Amino acid sequence: MENKNYNAFETAQEQFDGVAEILGLDQATKDFLREPLREFHFSIPITMDDGSKKVFRGFRVLHNDARGPGKGGIRFHPQETIDTVRALSMWMTWKCAVVDIPLGGGKGGVICDPHNLSKNEQERICRGWVRQLAKNVGPITDIPAPDVMTNAQHMLWMLDEYETIRGEKYPGFITGKPVGMGGSLGRTEATGYGVIFTLREALKELGIRPEDTTASFQGFGNVSQYAIQLYEQYGGKVISVSSWSQKEQKGFTYRNKSGINLKELLGITDNYGGIDKEKAETLGYEVLPGDAWIEQDVDILMPAALENEINKDSVKKIGARVKIIAEGANGPTTPEADQVIKEKGIFMIPDFLANAGGVTCSYFEQVQCNMNYFWSKDEVLGKLDSKMTAAFIAVSEMAKERDLYMRDAAYVIAIDRVNLACKNRGWI
Ligand code: NAD
């Protein structure tokens, strides 16, 4: 997103085109699936706290809903672009399909930086977003969720606006709500834990014990924090994490070769996953450049920040010891970098499989909202483990059977399922 030459949508289409060839899809199906079904671009005018007016740009893209209502997060980011939202909505379609949940792919965003907005201003943006879209989103149409720089509070404001407009209760309109207000236990942990469930299976397949591994993470937000927690529970050791410094406007990598202390780092991290650099230095962490996370001498790399982080240049820095890349973030690897990773024989757990725990738990949240009966955390996480493990095994069996790169195998399964749903509905 920071790189002006990188276009996430082109990457998503390029990945799709490659798999469309493998699957031998006809031209009309290719044309249909490589573009979103519909898009909304709109303005959100709000009153700032000082009384002035400001207009923010908002988006919602629905890539495909052949298998069920659209599903996907809303991102708040100063560099948000429509092409990023398009790419992410397409990846959501494949993600829901690969874990076999009855939902399609959507994504939304607002060009804004919550760091520079008061709580009240953020609330007005959330309500304004819903006001623009109330007719086109909903529990059986398209269901939003939190994503980069949005959280449970944002979702609750959005739910409240939606229910106010509709005059009825629709707890299934949006997911990622606070627990006790229609949220599911385990949702906060779900994406990070989901990545580690797939990593655990990959390690099993490679015959490596988690306790014999080390890892380096990019990002220290929701996904990384819970992934690190579970990875450490399995016995793994994290030696470095990177995060964005709002103050210095650049990323830094924080390293402790004997293992980071998760609790200690959480104590010096803000709500956006930003680690306090001065405090980290005081605690004895080595402070390295932002991109140093990728060149660490570790077994596992986990990009969990933004897209386009493993590209044709940075991929060259990956150390010889790396055996697995588990993609927590969406679209962190470019197709050129994939080529190099394939040649190096690194085991790839692709984003839309690895980070599907979030949407899977969101689906559970909807199911619970519809029943108006809520499960215990253990029940949620147990069901999540089963879903993620089954999806991983299906993809890795496909990869072995057809001698495919894991990303391609995941795509083959997902695109085939969506293609079939479109065909069975008589769309294409
Ligand atoms: P978050 O906002 O909680 O955390 C993002 C982290 O990345 C922060 O620590 C931030 O400091 C860091 N970061 C940002 N820019 C950076 C840079 N240039 N260099 C180093 N660090 C940088 O976000 P999150 O919810 O953890 O999501 C991370 C990724 O995972 C995103 O790609 C998101 O789309 C994807 N994802 C999230 C979920 C979810 O449920 N949260 C689900 C699926 C996928």
Image: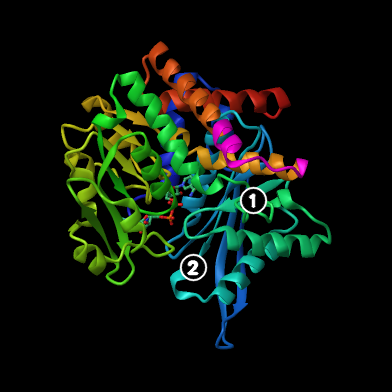
Amino acid type, mark 1: Gly
User: Mark 1 packing: few (<14 Cα in 10 Å), some, or many (20+)?
Assistant: many
Between 141 and 230, the residue placed more toward the observer is: 230
Residue 379 among magenta residues: yes
* Mark 2 beta carbon near ligand 1 (under 8 Å): no
Q: Quadrant of the N terminus?
A: bottom left
Which quadrant would residue 387 be assigned to in this image?
top right
Taking 345 as reference, is 226 above or below it?
below
Q: Where is residue 61 drawn, in percent x and y?
A: 59, 50
Q: Which residues are magenta?
A: 371-383
Q: Where is residue 367 drawn, in percent x and y?
A: 70, 39
**Dot 2 corresponds to which residue?**
112
- Hey, which residue is sitting farthest top in the picture? 401
Q: Quadrant of the C terminus?
A: top right
**Dot 1 corresponds to which residue?**
183
Taking 386 as reference, is 80 above or below it?
below
Q: Main secondary structure of the magenta part?
A: helix
Depth check, mark 1 against mark 2: the one in front is: 1
Q: Where is residue 51 drawn, in percent x and y?
A: 59, 88
How was this image coloured? Answer: rainbow
Q: Is residue 46 left or right of residue 243?
A: right
Local secondary structure at mark 2: loop
State the count of labels: 2
Q: Where is residue 397 drawn, in percent x and y?
A: 44, 15
Between 269 and 379, the residue placed more toward the observer is: 379
Residue 313 visible in the picture: no
Q: Which mark is residue 115?
A: none
Q: Residue at x 31, y 57 (%)?
A: 264
Local secondary structure at mark 1: loop
How far apart marks 1 and 2 lie (CA) works out to 25 Å
Amino acid type, mark 2: Cys
Q: Residue at x 22, y 62 (%)?
A: 283
